[in-house]
Amino acid sequence: MRTARMFVLLAAIGQPACSSGVRTAASPEKAESEVRFHEKEPPLPEGIACLDHPLEHYWHVSSKYRDPKHPFVPGKHYALDFPAPVGTPVLAAADGEVVAIGPVEQGKDAYVSVRFAEGWTYAVHHLSAVVSEIGQAVRRGDLLGLSGGAVGADGSGPWTTGPHLHFSVAYEGAFVNPAPKLCP
């Protein structure tokens, strides 16, 4: 727990948390070539005003979308990183269906991906526990898993620098900036 608190403190002064280029990439360099971004930010689908924050009480961003100072993938980080202690509940940002899961395994990035409208998904990465199942219907605020991201821990993936949650949003297979999609 002491390490998690220290990381949250470091993140508050702008230390990035992870690379998370692409979960299947063998290296950050390979990840850069596999990531697609929307150049124009599409609006959220009709009837969805915003997405809830996936963590309660942990809203500070340690690494922003396409962060040019990212330690592993400068300009290619496709998500927001929220520093949080390992084991923090990770909540559904919108109603939807779980469409993909990465299990908690050594050296792998554990994640949950939710389709919340036609062509739209959001995903949470670096989990220490996954409590969702593929095909499961989720509602805003439902528990998807527990945050992780501790260096070397199961589910963190190979390129994390400390405990945090990696939150991404995609439309038609290309990433969009999650920041303006989040509820104030």
Image (spheres, helix red, strand yellow):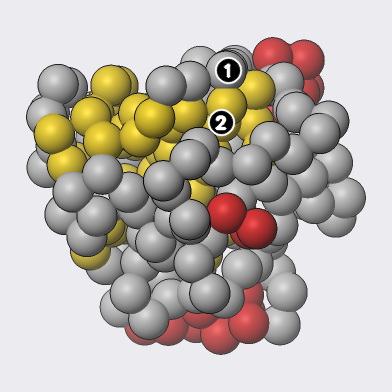
Q: In the image, what residue type sits under mark 1?
A: Gly
Comparing 175 with 89, the one in front is: 175
Label 1 neighbourhood size at 10 Å, few (<14), some (14-19), many (20+)?
some
Please state, as top left, top right, bottom left or bottom right, where the N terminus lies in the image: bottom left
Disc ID at residue 173: 1
The relative height of residue 140 versus residue 61 in the rendered view (above or below) is above
Residue 48 at x, y percent in the picture: 43, 48
In the drawing, what numbered circle is on residue 170?
Answer: 2
Q: Residue 180: percent from the left, percent from the top?
A: 65, 58
Q: Secondary structure at mark 2?
A: strand
Please state the horizontal and vertical placement of residue 97, each as a whole percent of the image. Answer: 23, 29
Q: Residues within 10 Å of mark 2 (few under 14, many from 20)?
A: many
Identify the residue shown where x is 57% and y is 26%: 171
Q: Secondary structure at mark 1?
A: loop
**Which three-letter amino acid code belongs to the residue tagged 2?**
Ala
Q: Is residue 113 something one can see in this rendering?
A: no
Residue at image position (68%, 36%) is 42
Instruction: Write the residue at 41% across / 46% down.
Output: 47
Numbered mark located on residue 148 in the image: none
Circles 1 and 2: CB atoms closer than 8 Å: yes
> Residue 132: where, in percent of width, then height?
14, 37
Q: Is 141 left, or right, of 67 in this rendering?
A: left
180 sits to left or right of 93: right
| Between 138 and 14, the one nearer to me in the picture | 138
* Residue 121 in sight from this viewpoint: yes
165 relative to 13, above or below: above
Nearest the viewer among 168 and 20 is 168
The residue that appears at 69% across and 14% down in the rendered structure is 34
Front one among 168 and 140: 140
